[in-house]
Amino acid sequence: MNRVAANYLDPYRSQEGSYGIGLDNKINPYLLKKDFPIFQEKVQGRDLIYLDNAATTQKPYPVIAAVEKYNQAFHGNPHRGAHYLSVKATELYDQARQKVQEFIKARSRKEIIFTRNTTESINLVAYSYGMNFIEENDEILLSIAEHHSNILPWQQVARSRRARLKYMYLDKDGRLSMDEVKRKISNKTKLVCLTQMSNVLGTIFPIKEIIDYAHERGALVLIDGAQGLPHLGVDVGELDADFYVFSAHKMLGPTGIGVLYARESLLEMMPPFQSGGDMIEYVTEDTASFAPLPEKFEAGTPNVEGAVGLAAAIDYLNNIGLDKIYQHEIDLTAYALEKMKGIPYLTLYGPLDLEDRGGIISFNVDKVHPHDLASIVDLDGIALRAGHHCAQPLLNFLQVGASCRISFYLYNTKDDVDKLLESLERARSWFVNGS
Ligand SMILES: Cc1ncc(COP(=O)(O)O)c(C=O)c1O
């Protein structure tokens, strides 16, 4: 029996502690790492130090095994047949939807639409809601810290609908003040699109306060939870967001599956984004009526194995507890920031304290281009991100061409931080002193 299948029999490996929780009731990342087969691989002949979790996260055995098990034993085309495998695939797909609904505390399964990723979820809202309900002279308000996937679709909508795009800017610490929000939301604001956490600076935005303020003025709000949900979780009912989007691959799940949560009343009035099989009720030569929610927005054969993997990732995260995961990331961030602040050749971007911040740190090393730095530390088995992080407007606003970024998740350790800093020191010395 192969390694994955063997672990599937006992997917929640607990022989050395329950879900990697130590006796102090905190995450023990050294135990947790054993659940992630990638850490048994060597990178450049070294142990992998994975600090690119804001880009994508690694997968634990239970997620890998759940996808493998689905493909080995249950694969069929859901909603399309009466045979065992079709019924089984339908059942697993529906269960995954229910798991997501419970995880984000949506009121109804109808409010959970499976997509490919955050980008597709935002495009769905832009093309279905934006292109039909945003009108000339309406304003779409974004923060300057948005990922390109929460900017470009709105540029298209603004252009087509002759609406106006406006931006909220950050203060010198990388925070978004309510003063700025109140200055920018006007009676023309139709939609506010905002990330829960900046993928560059790690800043957590006051989304609840912003949503309440926007609603008082009649605007809807879309929250990009790609960076927020995997670390902070969400209660969409309490938050009162109109749209909330995220990707499975940033929360231990597979690539190719994401989610759009939207208020049922909005989804009811929005036209389908894509059309074809699986989203219809009745079709004639010239017309069609659409399936009820959520199928109305899920044209074509869905990504069942992705949904199964996402459900397994949610179970895994729930078993550890998001509160413990966030605390672990904050402990690591405090440790890293304290050390990094003392290194004279580092420039750090974003909040230097721990208030309203997550486990993402962007920085530059004096006299070394971020891309060169990323290639050099890669030789030490260290994965970090260099570039504009798909947030060019933010980098322009900060007047930074590119930066390096490290981002933590549940399996990172203080050793990872120490090894990174040693590697940075070697890289800088090599570039500046030639040795
Ligand atoms: C804040 C934010 N939004 C959206 C995205 C896009 O996610 P995806 O590529 O999974 O669609 C990312 C990815 O890095 C992100 O960090």
Image (tube, rainbow, N blue to C red):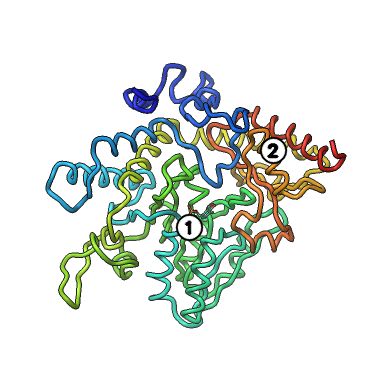
Element class at badge 2: helix
- Image coordinates of residue 354 in percent, x first then y, are 65, 42
The residue positioned 52% from the left and 55% from the top of the image is: 207
- Image coordinates of residue 382 in percent, x first then y, are 64, 36
Give the quarter of the figure containing the C terminus.
top right
Q: Identify the residue position indicated by label 1 in the image.
A: 223
Distance CA(mark 1)–CA(mark 2): 34 Å
Label placed on residue 162: none
| Pick the front one: 22 or 59 | 59
- Image coordinates of residue 423 in percent, x first then y, are 73, 34
- Image coordinates of residue 143 in percent, x first then y, are 59, 63
The residue positioned 63% from the left and 33% from the top of the image is: 381
Element class at badge 1: strand
To which quarter of the image does residue 275 belong? Answer: bottom left
Q: Is residue 163 above or below residue 214?
A: below
Give the quarter of the figure containing the N terminus.
top left
- Mark 2 neighbour class, 10 Å CA radius: few under 14, some 14 to 19, many 20 or more: many
Q: Residue furthest top?
A: 15
Q: Is residue 34 left or right of 427 when viewed as pictured? A: left
The amino acid marked with disc number 1 is: Ile
Label placed on residue 377: 2
Q: Residue furthest left?
A: 82
The amino acid marked with disc number 2 is: Val
